[in-house]
Amino acid sequence: MALPAASRQEFRQEFRQDLADIPILEDAGSVRMRSRDFFWFSPILKEALEDKRAEIIAVPRNKADVMRIAAACARHRVPLTVRGGGTGNYGQAVPLAGGVVLDMGKLDQVIWHKAGAGRFAAGARMLDIDRALAPAGHELRFYPSTRQHATIGGFVAGGAAGAGSCTWGQISDPGAVLAVEVVTVEDQPRVIELTGRDVLKVMHAYGVNGIITEVEVPLAPSHPWCERIATFPSLSAAARCAQTFTECDGVAKKLVTVHDPQVVPFLRRLATYAEPGHAMAIVMVSEPQADAFELMVADHGGCVTFRRTAEDARKAAFAETSGLQPLYEFTWNHTTLHAIRIDPTITYLQLRFPPANNLELVDWVAAQFHGEVLLHLEFQRRFGKVTCSSLPLVRYTTPQRLDNIMAELNAEGVAVSNPHTFVLDDAGWKRVDAPQAEFKRMADPYGLMNPGKLADWQDTRELA
Amino acid sequence: MALPAASRQEFRQEFRQDLADIPILEDAGSVRMRSRDFFWFSPILKEALEDKRAEIIAVPRNKADVMRIAAACARHRVPLTVRGGGTGNYGQAVPLAGGVVLDMGKLDQVIWHKAGAGRFAAGARMLDIDRALAPAGHELRFYPSTRQHATIGGFVAGGAAGAGSCTWGQISDPGAVLAVEVVTVEDQPRVIELTGRDVLKVMHAYGVNGIITEVEVPLAPSHPWCERIATFPSLSAAARCAQTFTECDGVAKKLVTVHDPQVVPFLRRLATYAEPGHAMAIVMVSEPQADAFELMVADHGGCVTFRRTAEDARKAAFAETSGLQPLYEFTWNHTTLHAIRIDPTITYLQLRFPPANNLELVDWVAAQFHGEVLLHLEFQRRFGKVTCSSLPLVRYTTPQRLDNIMAELNAEGVAVSNPHTFVLDDAGWKRVDAPQAEFKRMADPYGLMNPGKLADWQDTRELA
C-alpha cells in the first residue's frame, strides 16, 4: 500500500486538507517511535516488523477528529492503524502498510463512573483511570503490568489478563466489558455502540475492525492492596503455595505470581530478596488479610522477605515516591522486559495450564525444558476454577527449535498461544464466539485497517 | 444442673448481689422466648428441647457486665448459655441445664472500620452493621438469610455460609475472620484475643468454650446488588445456569440460589413469579452486570420474571419500604421457615455436593427422593471451586427414615451434616483443625458453658 512518490505528495496535500487542524506528526523520530510496539520481544517479529513505518501520525483531540480522520482514510483509501499505549507485543500498533497511525492518547477522558461501572475514552491510560477513581473507592478490575502506559482501549483490543485475573478472570469473560463504542472507517463514518455479547466482535481483534473510541467496564470497589514477596526452596513449593492461596476464596487478592529460581536473577531489583536458587512469589493482598498469606507461606516451607504497606504500594504505583517500582512491574510480560535488558537472546512464550492438572504440568515443563524455558506463573481464575498461565522466558536459538518446543508443549496438554506472529488468523482472530470478520466487512468496507494482519483478507475486501 | 428449690432461692439472692445493677429478665414470657432458637425446624430437636428453660436472662450492657456475669457464674457454678440473635437451628442458644442465658444484644457497637476490615461487638446485628458501613461503601462479606436478627458473634460461633458465599466461600475459610475476643468463665475472667488460625478455636463451637465479645472480619467493598428471579423448565436447567453463572468470575455476585419446582409453592409471595412446575433461580448481582446473568438465563432456556433495582433491593433489606421482603429471605434456611409455616410436617437436611460432580449428584438426589427430599441449591465457592450446598426440605415421617435418607446420601458421596442433633460431638465439634477442647478446658474450667452439648465432656470437667 506504499504509494509512489508523486502520489504520496498528492495524498499528503489532499489528506491534510481533509484533516484540517487535526494535529499531525511526521518527523522521522516521532513516526518511528509511534510505529512501534513491543514486538521486539520476539526475534521473529523483530526481523519482520523492525522497518515498518507509518507515513504520518494523526493525533485526534476528540471523537469528531477521529471521525474526520476515518472519513479521510476511507475517501483516499489510506491504511489506518490504531494505536493506544503501544504496549502490545505482536505488532498490533505497527502499520504494516504505511498510511496513518491514529494515536488515541488525547482521547483520555473519564466519561462517567458510578458504583460498579465506569466509562472511559479509549485512550485513557489505566493508571490514570485508577488515579481518577481512587477518591470514590473504585478501581479497574484488571490491568496489565504496563498499567502506566497501557490504554483501556488498547487493553480491550489486544489484552487478555493481568493483575486482577486471580480474582476476576479474563477481560473476555462474560460481563467483563459492558459496552464498546466503535467508529467505522467509511466515507460517512458511523458511531456504533456494542453491548452484551456484541462487544466480542471487536475484543482481541487488534484494532482491525473498527476504531474503539469508548469502553464501559464494571469496576471493582478497591481494597487496600499491600505487597509481599515470599521465597521458597523450589518452584514446585512456591507454585503449590500460590495455588492454595489463590483457591482461598476468603482472601481478597489482586496478584499472585511465581518465578522460577532461574528467573529471579533477571529481576535485578528484586534479586536481593531471594537467596540464590530460591523461587519467588509476588502477591498483592488486601492488607488486613496479609497474615493469611504469610501463614500459607510458612506451611509451604517459604519465607516472607519483603513487605510493603498498601499505602506505600499505592504511592509507588502512582509515582508519588521514589524507590522500588510497584511489584506488578515484575510480573506478567514485564518479566520478559527485565530479562531482555540483561540478555537480548531471551524471548518468551504464552502458555495456559489446564486447571485439572496445572501443577503437575508445571513440574513437567520445568524438568523437560530446564535451562531453556524458564517459567513464571500467573495464577488466575478461569471459569470458576483456579489455574495458572505463564509467559515463560525462553533462551532462543532458532525458529525451528521454538516451533518444536511449542509442539511438544501442546502435545502434553499445555495450551500455547504463539506470540511470534502478527498474523491474526494464527493468533486469536475469529477464535471467540463472535462474528468478527462480518463486523470487519461492515466497519471497514475498504479493508483499510492495518492491512496485512489478516492473511486471508485480501480476497474478500474491496481493493483500493 | 437444675437446682433444688431452697438452693435456687439462695442462688438467686447471691447471684443477684454479684450481678449488682446488670439488667435481668425472669418473667416466664421473656425466659421462654430467650431460651429458644429455631431448633423446632427439627421434629427431633423439638421434642428434645421444647421444655428447656434458663433460670434467668442476663442482659449485659458492656464488657464489664459480661465479665461480672462470667465471674458470678464461675463462683456459684451456674450454667451459662450465650445467646446472640437466637437464629440458630440446633439449640445453640437453648440452655440445656438451666442457669443463665447471656443475651448479648446490647453489646452492639461498631468498634471501628476502615478499608478492608472492621471490628464489631458480638451482639451487633448483621443488618445493622451493614447499615452503619453503607456510607463508607463497605459491607459484610457474608450474611445468613436471618441477616436482620443474626448477630456477628452468633454467626461466627454457629454459622457457616450464606449470601456472599458464592463469592467469598465460608466463614471458616482462612482469613475470613481476622480476630475474635473471648471472655473466659473463671473466677477472674480473662479477656483473650484470638488471631490468625487461633480464631478456629471458638468458631463453630456454638459458644461452649468462651464468651465471644468482639469479632474482627475483613469487609467487602459494596457493589450495587440488584435482584433477579429467573424460571426454568427443570431443576436441572436451573442448576446448570446457576453453576455457569457462579463460575463466571467476571460477574460480581452476592447470592445464587436455585429452588426445585416442588419448593416454589412454599415461597408464597414468590410463587406468582413462576409457572407451576418450573424451577426458580434467585440471584443478587452487581447491577451494571445484570445483563450478563440474563443472557445466561436465555442460554439455558429460562426466563427472567422479576427484576428489582439495587436501590429498591437495598430499601427492602433496610426496611425503608413496604412490599416484598429482600429475596435473600427466600433462600438458605429461610426456605425451611416458609415451608414449615405452610406444612408443619416439613423438616430439612444439610447437604454438601462435591465440586467434581455436584450437578450429576443433584440430578440423582432429585430423582431418588422425588416428593420426599425437595432440593434448593445454594451455589458457592469452596476452596477455589464452584459447587452447591443444599438445605433441602424433607417430608418427615420417622427418625429411622431420616437416618436412612442420610445414610443413602452419604453413601452416594453427598456429604450430610445432621441438623437434628444438639450434641456437638456429632455435628462439627473438633472437626476443624484447632484445639477447641483444649481451649474449652482453659476458658471454661468448671464446664459451665451450656453443659450437655458435649457428650463426652462430663468425664473431664470439674463437677460443680
Image (cartoon, coloured by chain):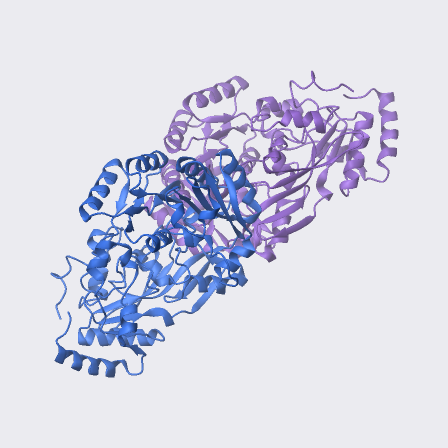
Chain colours: A purple, B blue
Q: Is residue B165 visible?
A: yes
Name the residue rendered at 44%, 54% in the picture: B141
Q: Nearer the viewer, residue A464 or A347?
A: A464
Name the residue rendered at 51%, 19% in the picture: A403
Decide if residue A56 is on the left or right side of residue B203. right
Among the 4 quarters of the image, the one containing residue B11: bottom left
* Number of marks in picture: 0
Return the x and y of residue B90 as percentages of the image width and height: 26, 57
> Quarter holding the N terminus of chain B?
bottom left
B76 shown above or below B127: below
Decide if residue A346 is on the left or right side of residue A103. left
Return the x and y of residue B101 as percentages of the image width and height: 26, 70
Among the 4 quarters of the image, the one containing residue B423: bottom left
Name the residue rendered at 54%, 28% in the picture: A347
B442 shown above or below A187: below
Q: Is residue B356 visible?
A: no
Return the x and y of residue B27 as percentages of the image width and height: 27, 77
> Quarter holding the C terminus of chain B?
bottom left
